[in-house]
Amino acid sequence: IVLTAHPTEVNRRTMLLKHQRIKAILEQFDRSDLIEYEKRTLLRDLRAQVASLWETDELRRSKPSPLKEARSGLAVVENVLWRAVPSFLRKLDDVLVNETGYSLPLDIAPIKISSWMGGDRDGNPNVTPEITFEVSMMSRWSAATLFKADIEKLRSELSLKPASKELLAISENSREPYRSVLKQIESSLQDTIDWTSAKLKNQSTEGLKPLLKTSDLMAPLKIIHSSLLETNNQDLANGLLTDIIRRVAAFGLTLLPLDIRQESTRHSEALDAITRYLGIGSYLQWDEITRRNWLSTELSSKRPLLPKKILDDGGKSIGFSYNVIDTLKTFEMISILGDESLGAYVISQCQQASDILAVALLQQEYSVSSPLRVVPLFETLDDLERSANTIEALFSIPTYTGRINNKQEIMVGYSDSAKDAGRLAASWAQYNAQEAMINVAKKYNIDITFFHGKGGTVGRGGNPAIYNAILAHPPNTINGRFRVTEQGEMITQNFGQDAIAERTFDLFTAGVLVERFSKRPFLKQEWRDMMVSLSTISCQAYRQIVREEPRFVPYFRKATPEMELAGLNVGSRPSKRNPKGGVESLRAIPWVFAWTQTRFNLPTWLGVGEALSTEYKNNPKILLDMYNEWPWFQTLIDLLEMILVKSEVKIAENYDKQLVHDNESITLGQELRTKLQVTSQAVLQVSGNPGLQSNNYLLLRSLAVRNPYVDPLNIIQAELLRRLRSNEEAVENKLSEEELNVLQDALLITINGIANGMRNSG
């Protein structure tokens, strides 16, 4: 599970912590043994927390830095996952023993947590090599601090004397062998804390002997565990010590290993600078075959491309651009951080095999001792459709396959593909691409692990039903291995509290296990043909509006708070890859976020109505068979139905009344609302439900409770947008700065409120 810094958590961390404290107090009120004094004390505490919450500024007044984002990720581990992971593994072990008779191996971690916070530099100039280094050191400092506290507690428990010969040997025959060894571990962990602190302050680390490899911490703990078992102290062995060993297996000494992510063009620019420096031409002007041949040759060679220490003067002596120097320094930083600190190197906008070879070569150039897994990310519809050919070209290069030990990780992007082609076409492209890539991998005897880059919303590949979402993936594409991103508000929802985090782990584990051993339905050719037709129709309908309709962009700007979202300060990276671009350069998150605010949810359903209604007229039986017999298609339709029941035509129409004034945009808004109604009818025809989500009582009940609070916020938001935009256009009688600040704050609070009410943002 990869925690990302994608900017969709609208709530301040301060507010989240206050909510958690209030929740804890309310849980205490449920105790049946409370005496009157305790009740009065809890009531005073509750009033104090509510008063503090009421008087606290709800808004972020500045954008969070990458370091702040990273600290929020570490806080999730420190405050919740540090307890939840061993608790979940203890439960999993108990179930395994009861059901199979086998225990979960002590040093095996079925669940691993990693992070993009401080490593994801795709389109974020604020994430520099120095930031990544600092975040990695922060993570090691946190790990050492947490483990030291655990070891201190364990040392107070293990005062016994009987021990195995192996433990006595490493304790030098101490009278209290367990405490002696644990004291040594404590000392090493303190050295680790001091070492990371010195690294962060750029101070000397002389004399310190930090623990840098997880095995150095795991080995003595396993010896202690074996000794306790050997001396018939099973209860002590299987208590806190087991939890610590499982934490070591799950988190290691880096707590949250970082993935690096960068756009493919940055690597191409760096290699172009290098080839020009070497006088062998322009890498950017070479065709794909020429690039592959040169990269393969260099990967087989041991000679460096550039002189050592060439970046000592910042690359000024050779005239490299800032972007090129930043890219090269990133690889230099990777080589310095060493083993375990980093996980994968994800290449966004990956289009060709050379994009993957380029990263492999740059790692080699900087002598990375344990090279990061090079992970291509296929995002757009075109990239997904040619992904199998890209992988085939890659696997046909022995220089590359000889390096990967028959294992390859591939990331599938759900956000940009949906923004590019619409939800339905993107979903089918993702399904097809995974199937095709698995077939290519089998041909070359390579094990594929798919890394799913999903957002919180359905429009960005999210699915609140984790278990069903896993079972809906194409057959033979998970095989017991599942890697997925968790971002923003979904981190809070799924991992914000111990019990909920454990439940989330339950669902992930159950889904992966059931998928591994379940027989999947055979995909009939007529179903495939139907999906090709549905995808074609929906993609054309989606793009006709989003790309080709000249009225659309002006309408989008007027009818949604897209332009005002920047004031939320929810993330460290810009909302656009290209600051001067239009909708096409807008990142998927603000694109979805803007439509979620108006309750129109357009990116999720646009194009679906035309496709389903057209094919239902021609082939209703096939569509009904697909819904009833194919879990993937049923999940797709059910998710669309869930989004449609959350959409409110009247609310969206009010935004138009308040904010849209030209006839062309007014007409387009009417046309789009008609499309929404057509889509709802078409989806119901396929699902057979009498009403949207009529079989989902919990959701309908939730909406009935939630909407009376959210609806007024939408009305207020539309009015605030009208006033603020009118003020911008006014020549006379402009609002005072104080009045403007009040309206802007009120607008941002409505955005927060609606995002919380809708349970997701982007």
Image: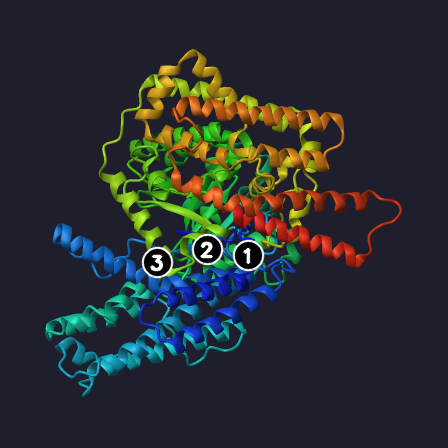
Question: Residue 294 at x, y = what percent?
Answer: 49, 39
**Residue 752, which numbered label?**
none
Residue bearing the label numbered 3: 499
Give coordinates of residue 109: x percent, y percent: 28, 57
Amino acid carrying mark 3 in the image:
Ala
Q: Do the residues labelled 2 and 1 touch (CB within 8 Å)?
A: yes
- The residue under the point 50% across, 78% down is 204
Q: What is the spatial separation of the Cα atoms under label 3 and label 1, in whole angstroms?
A: 21 Å
- Residue positioned most to the right: 732
Q: What element carries label 1?
A: loop
Crowding around mark 1 (Cα neighbors within 10 Å: few <14, some 14 to 19, many 20+) is many
Could you tell me which residue is drawn at 29 percent across and 62 percent down? 86
Is 398 positioned to the left or the right of 414 in the image? left
User: Which numbered tag is attached to residue 492?
Assistant: 2
Secondary structure beneath dot 2 equals: helix
Question: Which is more N-terminal, label 1 or label 2?
Answer: 1
> Could you tell me the amino acid type at mark 1?
Asn
Whether residue 503 sits left or right of residue 611 in the image: it is left
| Closest to the observer, 672 or 179 | 672
Give the colour scheme shown: rainbow
